[in-house]
Amino acid sequence: MNSCSNILRSVSLLTAAGLAVSAIAEELPWPTNDLRYAVYTNFVAHTNARTTQLHARFTREPGWPTNGVPCAEWHPQSLLQGWTGFNGLSICHAFEGNPGQVRITLLTRRHGYVRGHSMGEVPGVVLTNRAGLKCWFLTTNNTLVEAEVAADLIRFPWNGSGNLPRETNDWGLLLFKKDLPLSIPSLPVISQADFLAYYPSSQSNIMFYVEQGGHCGAQSNPGIGGIFPQFSVNGWKGGDSGSPNFLPMPDHTLVLAGGRGTSFASSEMQADIDKLTRWAGLRTNDYQLRWVSPTNYLRH
């Protein structure tokens, strides 16, 4: 974000001398019209001197979250710096539990994505028990932006027992009281079907995995490991659920590919967004997911 010996050789040259993309291109096992090739070469070209740290500074004022605010700055050398959409990731909120948990990723100007399981709600129903709770985002120039929850709608896997309907999706959707400013971007999304068709699993794939401790790893899966040890972060711990999985596209745009243990965007998710939007008396056409389908690359 398979000829393993060739991949590892290219990495060792990169870390030793900042290898040019043209040099490593000959080592990769994919054709040049493969999305994995394009993602890998773009990643290597832009990651010298980068760090997994999200923030250079992060504290909370006394009285947070009721009376205080977070004080934060993006790390200038973070892996996410320079990627379109990176600050659509909230820095914290009032119902996160332990710091960094239940990460919010902005889907539209007014809707945020979190995990569905362990949120303690009836699935598929618009509820207001989190209304008024505050969430914080940060512009690219480190200006704090505050948002308040108006309502939410949760879905989580359920076997159909008791009085709850059977459910296979896992997501939470937050509706904010106001549209967020354009300085806080919403993230485009990819369907699970397109993700599997255009970016099939490989040990040398690059994905960005944000975790609760304030880091973002670049590796093929969210656990420890990967071909870039300096960018390896354990993003599969208890509490990381719902943290975003970002596909770092060759045009330097981050695309949301589901969350840790939670569902990809789908037509069902859009229907839930529409349900929240209608509940607020707003136009559904103004709050649509932005889909990415990389059809100009090889379909597997």
Image (tube, rainbow, N blue to C red):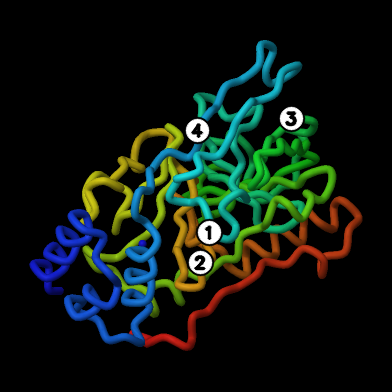
Q: Which residue is mark 2?
A: 252
The answer to which quarter of the image holds residue 32 is bottom left
Which kind of residue does numbered mark 1 sit on?
Answer: Trp
- The residues tagged by marks 1 and 2 sit, at their Cα atoms, a distance apart of 5 Å
Place of residue 93 in the rendered image (x, y in percent of width and height, measured from the top left): 64, 31
Label 4 crowd bin: few (<14), some (14–19), many (20+), radius 10 Å: few
Of 30 and 79, nearer the camera is 79
- The residues tagged by marks 2 and 3 sit, at their Cα atoms, a distance apart of 33 Å
Residue 133 tag number: 3
The answer to which quarter of the image holds residue 273 is bottom right
- The residues tagged by marks 2 and 4 sit, at their Cα atoms, a distance apart of 22 Å
Place of residue 76 in the rendered image (x, y in percent of width and height, measured from the top left): 50, 43
Q: Which residue is mark 1?
A: 83
- The residues tagged by marks 1 and 3 sit, at their Cα atoms, a distance apart of 29 Å
- The residues tagged by marks 1 and 4 sit, at their Cα atoms, a distance apart of 17 Å
For marks 4 and 3, the one nearer the N-term is 4
Q: Give the number of the mark in front: 1 or 3.
A: 1
For marks 1 and 3, the one nearer the N-term is 1
For marks 2 and 4, the one nearer the N-term is 4
Dividing the image into 4 quarters, which one contains the C terminus? bottom left
